[in-house]
């Protein structure tokens, strides 16, 4: 076999490694141990979102704030890796211990705190239906070994007191419709800018979020907050019941795959030297 044929074979081998190689499955570590393949979080349907500086008559930009807790840690296929349960005071310690003994993740929690910058594109004459566009934003996700996020009263607490495990930013999104009576839905993409490798490995790269905001008759089992972790929800602002699913991806080749690529490329160099 001449040099050109050998080089072609080795190049194809390298390409095969990149295209068909297994990528390292993300893992997540908590009090239940290390689980894989980690894919994301199912944020609770009773989470909250609220506006800041929303004044449709005088400004076309505002901030949307979001906090929530996870009801499940999900696998890459969307199925739950672990179901999670929210408790709102320390008196539930016995229930937490029982759930942990059953492997149901009762004694810890994951919470998310996010902000989105939004732009009002247009509204109808009565301002009951408007078009909005997310222009950017950021998120932080916390792991807390005490499940203390409290949303049962108007004073919400316990959403940012854990260990930060993930942070990231959101891209501009598509223009979406929101109705004053029912709310609406948004789909967002973004980048992960920080991964705490004590809890999640390898580093995550990107994220996708689908979120639904509910108003009026669409709201169920929800106590709207007047403050969250000591920060007041401004008077005259809009408070939504929020639901969301967030997924993550990591495209880091496994060491074995990189080694095979190195062997393939090294082989090309070796053949070239022998030919000379």
Image: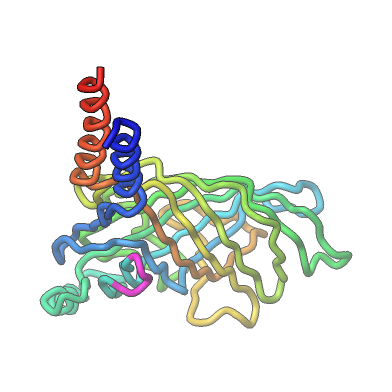
Question: In front here: 109 or 91?
Answer: 109
Q: Position of residue 244 (x, y in %)?
A: 48, 67
Q: Residue at x 78, y 69 (%)?
A: 128
Residue 110 in view (yes/no): yes
Q: Position of residue 50 (x, y in %)?
A: 57, 59
Q: Residue furthest front?
A: 1
Q: Position of residue 28 (x, y in %)?
A: 23, 58
Residue 252 in view (yes/no): no
Find the magenta span and give its range: 76-80
Number of numbered discs present?
Answer: 0
Name the quadrant of the N terminus.
top left
Q: Main secondary structure of the magenta part?
A: loop
65 is higher (above) or lower (below) than 210: above
Question: In front here: 62 or 17?
Answer: 17
Question: In front here: 249 or 16?
Answer: 16
Name the quadrant of the C terminus.
top left
Q: Residue at x 60, y 63 (%)?
A: 186
Q: Residue furthest right?
A: 125
> Which image quarter: residue 98?
bottom left
- Magenta stretch contains residue 78: yes
Q: Is residue 180 left or right of residue 257?
A: right
Q: Residue furthest left?
A: 101
């Amino acid at each position: 076999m001449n040099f050109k044929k050998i080089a072609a074979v080795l190049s194809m081998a390298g390409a095969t490694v990149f295209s068909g190689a297994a990528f390292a499955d993300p893992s997540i570590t908590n009090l239940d141990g290390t689980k894989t393949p980690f894919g994301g979080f199912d944020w609770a349907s009773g989470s909250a979102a609220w506006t800041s500086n929303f004044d449709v008559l005088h400004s076309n930009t505002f901030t949307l704030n979001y906090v929530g807790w996870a009801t499940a840690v999900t696998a890459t296929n969307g199925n739950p890796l672990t179901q999670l349960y929210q408790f709102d005071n320390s008196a539930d310690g016995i229930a937490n211990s029982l759930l942990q003994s059953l492997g149901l993740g009762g004694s810890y929690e994951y919470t998310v705190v996010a902000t989105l910058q939004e732009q009002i594109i247009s509204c109808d004459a009565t301002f009951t239906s408007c078009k909005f566009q997310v222009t950017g934003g950021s998120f932080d996700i916390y792991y807390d070994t005490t499940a203390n996020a409290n949303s049962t009263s108007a004073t919400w607490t316990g959403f940012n007191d854990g260990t930060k495990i993930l942070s990231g930013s959101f891209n501009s999104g598509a223009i979406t419709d929101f109705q004053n009576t029912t709310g609406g839905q948004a789909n967002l993409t973004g980048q992960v800018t920080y991964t705490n490798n004590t809890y999640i490995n390898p580093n995550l790269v990107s994220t996708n979020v689908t979120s639904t905001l509910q108003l009026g008759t669409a709201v169920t089992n929800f106590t709207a907050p007047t403050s969250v972790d000591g920060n007041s929800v401004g008077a005259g602002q809009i408070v939504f019941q929020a639901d969301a699913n967030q997924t993550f991806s990591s495209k880091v080749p496994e060491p074995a795959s990189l080694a095979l690529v190195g062997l393939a490329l090294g082989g090309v160099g070796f053949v070239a030297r022998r030919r000379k």
